[in-house]
Amino acid sequence: MLKSATHILLLVLLAMAAMSLWLRLNEPRLIYFPERAIAATPQQLGMKYEEVWLTAEDGVQLNGWFMPCGRPSGLTVLLLHGNAGNISHRFEKYGIFHQLGLDVFAPDYRGYGNSAGEPDEAGLYRDARAAYRYLVERRGVDPRKLVVYGESLGVAVAVDLASQATVAGLVLEEGFTSAPDVGQEMYPFLPVRRLMRSRYDTLGKMGRIRAPLLIFHSRDDEFFSAQHAQKLLAAAPAPKELVWLHGGHNDAFMQSGEIYRDALRRFADSVGGL
């Protein structure tokens, strides 16, 4: 009996070790889902835009779109997108920003769309800094008129940037506290926190934010529970606000309609954009 139990325990430990190794080796594939093909350009959808090329600190060439709304005295939004697709999959959001009178700059991270390289945590942080420098140094955008907007994985990237740079405001949509926290929730039987190389420690950087904060989160988010948003809010200095949406992780901003738009409008007005 004891021999049989020992054999079963050994098999369980071997299975866990194999799964841990698989998780470690496949970590990038579990985090990043880039698409190279551009589905459409803003021009094809009737929007004015300028294609932009910029270089990150480590020499990686990045591609993006600057989409003016026609009100140069208003805010500019730097949109840092999520882990899937590319900048050609966010037109609903660009349209909302334009309706609110906001210029938009949407860069693709390394490995996404027409940007060179392969994605990793340090690289995405560099890409965000390159996008910020482009807006401030090359386009002459006043940092006090620049709102950084992060969605999903882009929340961690946006918080990293805003914790170091001057910005008018920070908007976080469907974010998370850290990559290991998310991984541990997905694989509770594995020592994910020790295994993961990617940290994306959003929560640990929230205390360094020195700009007004708006958090959007859906209680129906199938990937990140409401606790993630609540913890991020609690860790951030004031002024700050959490607006609850409804709908899935990817479409809550659309499903919530005026709740989302009104909150974004109020926030833009409060930081001087409208």
Image: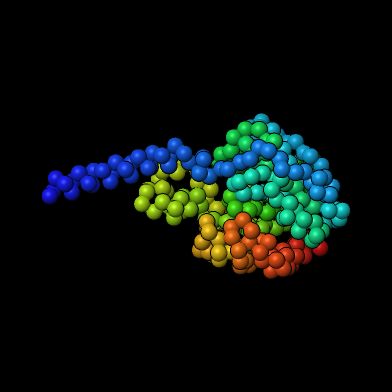
Color theme of the render: rainbow
Q: Is residue 20 left or right of residue 73?
A: left
Q: Residue at x 41, y 51 (%)?
A: 187
The quarter of the picture where the C terminus appears is bottom right
Q: Farthest residue toward the top?
A: 59
Q: Name the spot of residue 170 as percent of width and height, x first.
A: 67, 57
Can see residue 127?
Answer: no
Q: Name the spot of residue 270 as percent of width and height, x first.
A: 75, 66
Q: Quadrant of residue 120?
A: top right
Can see residue 251?
Answer: yes
Q: Residue at x 53, y 48 (%)?
A: 200
The answer to whether residue 27 is above or below residue 213 is above
Asked whether 184 or 241 is in front, the reply is 184
**How many marks are shown on the rendered structure?**
0
Asked whether 21 or 211 is in front, the reply is 21
Q: Is residue 6 left or right of residue 25?
A: left
Q: Farthest residue toward the left?
A: 1
The answer to whether residue 169 is above or below residue 51 is below
Q: Name the spot of residue 193 as percent of width and height, x first.
A: 42, 48
Q: Residue at x 56, y 43 (%)?
A: 32
Q: Name the spot of residue 166 as percent of width and height, x first.
A: 70, 51
Q: Is residue 13 left or right of residue 164?
A: left
Q: Residue at x 18, y 46 (%)?
A: 6
